Structures are given as structure tokens and as C-alpha cells.
Amino acid sequence: MERRAQQPGDAQQPGKDGGGDSPPTPQPFLEVTCRSSGKVRRFAAGTTARYALHAINRKLEPGAPPALHVEAIRDGEELVSLGPSAVLADYSRG
């Protein structure tokens, strides 16, 4: 079975009861940039940091330094390091 990512047009339209001012739905994925390779990888929201590191490290070229942790960055704010059991989520709108 194949699953596709949610597209912006897939969101349900507001009904006749109002509710047309609902906040936009977040993207169904997060982008993680690997400093070793410079490549950007996409992960579903809810993925653990441990799995993201595993997936990134297994695709690195031989000899490249492995990724050791995941950092969350938002413009104008302090960097946050995520532990292995942390869940990746997008809080950029809040």
C-alpha cells in the first residue's frame, strides 16, 4: 500500500456552521539538515530523533562524521538540542 503526504488542497472545507477562520494545518513533514553531508532529509512529524539520526547516518558517505544529535532552530531564538527519545514536531507557527 502506498501513502502520500497530505496536500494543502486535502484539508476539509469549512462547513455551513462557520469556522472559516481555522489556523492553517502544519506541514506533514519536517526538514532536517545534516551538517556532515549538507543534505536535507524529510521526516514525518512524530518521528523520534533516534530514528532520524539512524536514517541520516546510514546514508552518509564512508568516512563522513556521523550525526550525533538533532538541534531545533527557530530564527531569533536559542538553539535546542533534542535527546534520542524526543519527538520531531513543527512549532514554527506558535
Image (cartoon, rainbow, N blue to C red):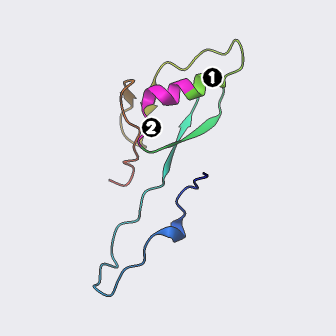
Circles 1 and 2: CB atoms closer than 8 Å: no
Q: Residue type at mark 2?
A: Thr
Q: Residue at x 59, y 22 (%)?
A: 57
**Which label sits on residue 58?**
1
Mark 2, secondary structure of its residue: loop
Give the residues drawn in magenta, as a range. 46-54
Q: Which residue lies furthest to the front in this view?
A: 1
Give left or right: position of 14 versus 28.
left
Mark 1, secondary structure of its residue: helix
User: Is residue 10 at all visible to an observer of this figure?
Assistant: yes
In the figure, 80 relative to 61: above or below? Answer: below
Q: Which residue does the numbered mark 2 point to in the structure image?
A: 47
Q: Where is residue 92 drawn, in percent x and y?
A: 39, 50
Q: Main secondary structure of the magenta part?
A: helix
Q: Residue type at mark 1?
A: Arg
Crowding around mark 1 (Cα neighbors within 10 Å: few <14, some 14 to 19, many 20+) is few
Q: Is residue 91 magenta?
A: no
Crowding around mark 2 (Cα neighbors within 10 Å: few <14, some 14 to 19, many 20+) is some
Q: Residue furthest right?
A: 62
